[in-house]
Amino acid sequence: MSGRLATNESGVWECVSARVDPDAQVEQRFFGLRTNGVWRAMRGRAPVATVFQLLLLNLALQVADGLVTYTGLRVGLREANPLLCKSFALWGVGPTLVLYKSLACVLLLVLYCLPARPLVARAFRILAVLSCVCTLIPWVALFVALCAGWL
């Protein structure tokens, strides 16, 4: 009797049959990438591990955005978001950033709890790209301009 190793939906290796043949075909997946180069998430199945990694990435981006925003404001740069500017005037920079970034992290956790894994994975990918393009890249460009003496 020959067996085969495969990963379940959680990405955990498991034995399909009682006996494992050392020459059995092994289906390998690495971060959702199969050996034939097709993303599982694009075929409608996003493993729990991939969605969790995307959640961690988005949480890290929120923390990084908060730190970069705080640092930029401390060195004299201005925030472009009018809602944040008004909130800074009411509550101060630190409490406002903690409040807004905490709210963003809670919303990411709510999104993570939704049952539609392929849609959640796609939403996390889109949010990560938007977070980089709309928040981190402009702040880095401002820091570079400041260091170069252009501001």
Image: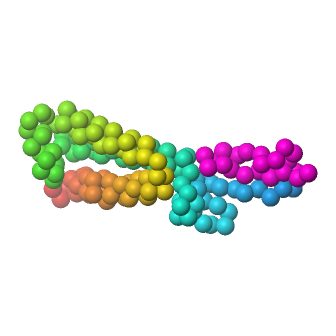
- Measuring from the top left, give residue 61's x and y in whole percent: 36, 47
Residue 148 visible, this orientation: no
Does residue 87 appear left or right of residue 145 in this picture? left
Q: Can residue 142 be seen here? A: yes
Quarter of the image with the C terminus in it: bottom left
- The answer to whether residue 61 is above or below residue 92 is below
Name the residue rendered at 66%, 45% in the picture. 12
Residue 151 sits above or below residue 52 on the image = below
Q: Position of residue 132 (x, y in %)?
A: 34, 55
In the picture provided, is 143 more to the left or to the right than 124?
Answer: left
Q: Residue furthest right?
A: 1
Q: Tag count in the figure?
A: 0
Q: Quadrant of residue 110?
A: top left
Residue at 80 percent of width and 52 percent of height: 4
Dominant secondary structure of the residues highlighted in magenta in the image = loop
Residue at 53% of width from left, 61% of height from top?
Answer: 44
Residue at image location 47% in from the left, 48% down from the top: 115
Tell whether position 21 is magenta: yes
- The verdict on residue 148 being magenta is no
Q: Quadrant of residue 127?
A: bottom left
* Magenta span of residues: 1-22
Measured as percent of width and height from the top left, residue 7 is found at 68, 50
Residue 65 image point, x, y percent:
30, 46
